[in-house]
Image: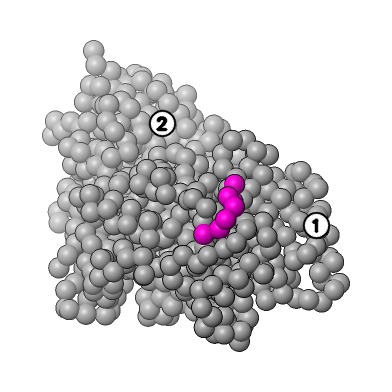
Amino acid sequence: MIQADVLIVGGGMAGQTLAAALGGAGLAVVLVDRERPAETRALAYDGRTSAVAFGAMRALDGIGLWSRLSDGAEPILEIRVSDRDSPLFLHYDHAALGNDPLGFIVENTAIRRALGDHLAALPTVQMIAPASVAQLERGRGRATATLDDGRTITALLAVAADGRNSPMRRAAGINVAEWSYPQTGLVCTIAHEKPHRGVAHERFLPAGPLAVLPMRGDRSSIVWTERADLAPAMLDLDDAAFAREIENRFGPHLGAMTLEGARWSYPLAFTLADRYVMPRLALLGDAARAIHPIAGQGFNLGLRDVAVLAEVVVDAARLGLDPGDMSVLERYERWRRFDGLALAATTDLLNRLFSTAFPPVQMMRDLGLAMVNEIPQLKRFFMRDAMGTAGDLPRLVRGEAL
Amino acid sequence: MKHAQPHASVDASEVAKFAALADSWWDTNGPYRPLHRLNPVRLAFIRDRLCALLERDARSLKPLKGLRIADIGCGGGLLTEPLARMGAEVTGIDAAEENVAAAAAHAEETEVTISYRATTAEALVAEGASFDAVISMEVVEHVADRDAFLADCVALTRPGGGLFLATLNRTVKSYAMAIVGAEYVLRWLPRGTHDWKRFVRPSELASALRNAGADVKALAGVGYNPMTDTWGLEKGVDVNYMAFAVSRED
């Protein structure tokens, strides 16, 4: 029987970051992941990038991870939101709020490698992989997990960080609201002729948004939302033709584009758990809510989960209280649910609003974008929201120690 | 377990009232729900003051490691167990044997080492016991001889050690909130839990402690925010409050 304070099931970015935060505070953590660690460090495993909002960067810094990531992170200095050929667009410039960048674009592979190296150096964190949890028993005093190889782990709190389809969440009988979009996310990296100057572009097209996000060098990360029925044909194109399709959609600002490395495709869906906690169990990251990637907020939301759950668990542990007790977990749920719900609803609405060619809707949203652009207070609010520095913030996101 | 002898500072009818509730102590949504909500605020106050007094790191996981602490009127052990998990060697005493039995059974279940005894503060004084810190939450308003009880608490605190007391102030507002509000309107507490006339003014507490050899260093109000369903420290001490005193060294 392996004893721990907290058992984390799922070694994705959210689960590992929580392990780093809790382990850094001295708690005994066991992390179970079904993948072989060497595989998750390979580029072929996940070619995506993550937008790390400024607040999320502070949280990563507080956990001690940012120093391992900053060299490969490209600062976002401006965000330009545009609607096809419309002259009206929304423009966020970091200089409007001070000197801090709005956020950073970081390659997921870099995040996974940094997490792996960081966790290996934490004495109270134990990684068990590859392994999966066959059964979780949530008892009065402790939660006990039985692994498929028969090993057992007992902890005061079990955290389900096992992704959008979370088997742990299903086993606990927590219902989700979910629907899928008739859209596919196509992801790749491109090299381009002209420098991006730190500008992130979000271009709304009838099939869905096209995001062009600045990476180190003259490279950008592409998140191209395409109609699900058209996506297979796009994926069948050769590299040069695929790059031309992106050029056609994006326009000439970055010059000629060439594809770098592989392409990935992801079906787009929306999942929201109807509760985030049960006695001795908390849902984290995509297991709690997976949103449309339109606003680049998935990892940021996961990191906010991490910052809040780490804070309530560590606060409880430092007071000798039981971190798996509902009185502690309810604080996490109350704090996180609104944020998750609001963002899920907003991104869903944005996607629906911008994926239409119906002229009155087009005109309204153009006016809306222009209005936000012209009203400084409104714009600063949206910028702070995008930076992840609005609202009631956990200590790590405020840039304070856990 | 042997029945504790009745003592001057114990009022028999008051003890019986809480004993009837002993089994439900640990139900976080049961009759002691307000205490469970209040607990983190009290624990943080105790930990932070004690760590400042004895120069310890409040951010560590065992900030009270090795400290000898007495929890007087420990009830079901709601405060006693966390203190032990913070590393303290805790003695939990309660005049009601049912409370002590419930607390000990729970500590066994959660694998926390605590010395629970059905006894009184004055009996501990008679044994010559001494602690780095003495904690007594919501007891002083239930005892028959308040000044004698407070003197016992001071006697149990080693010179330079900390004494923590929580009670209710005797004000119009405390009558409205603790009696009418908590017992009759919200039904947080069974009717008759408190007798307003026994509530203690901070000045009365401070002068009794001073006479016994301890000086009050801090008073903190404890208030409820109905919007967030949480308790927190506040400046006003006109209803619930905590006092932190230090036993004089000379």
Q: Which residue is drawn at 52% across and 53% down?
A: A218
**Is residue A271 placed above or below B153 in the rendered structure?**
below
User: Please, what is the three-letter code of the amino acid marked with disc 1?
Assistant: Leu
Would you say A256 lies left or right of A262 here?
right
Can the viewer see residue B55 in this picture? Answer: yes
Residue A140: mark: none
Residue A88: mark: 1
10 Å crowding of disc 1: few (<14), some (14-19), many (20+): some
Judged from the image, the secondary structure of the residue bearing numbered disc 1 is loop
Q: Residue at x 73, y 54 (%)?
A: A90
Would you say A318 lies left or right of A88 here?
left
Q: Position of residue B22 (x, y in %)?
A: 32, 59
Is A276 magenta? The answer is: no
Display colour scheme: one colour
- Quarter holding the C terminus of chain B? top left
Asked if marks 2 and 1 touch (Cβ < 8 Å), the reply is no
10 Å crowding of disc 2: few (<14), some (14-19), many (20+): many
Judged from the image, the secondary structure of the residue bearing numbered disc 2 is strand
Query: Number of numbered discs present?
Result: 2
In three-dimensional space, the C-alpha distance between marks 2 and 1, rounded to whole angstroms, equals: 62 Å
Q: Which residue is drawn at 39% across and 23% down?
A: B216
Classify residue A34 by image quadrant. bottom left
Q: Where is residue B164 in the image (x, y as percent from the top left)?
A: 35, 33
Q: Which residue is drawn at 32% across and 57% down?
A: A113
Residue farthest along the bottom direction in this orientation: A229
**Is residue A183 placed above or below A386 in the rendered structure?**
below
- Quarter holding the N terminus of chain B? bottom left
B226 and B117: which one is in front?
B226
Dot 2 corresponds to which residue? B243
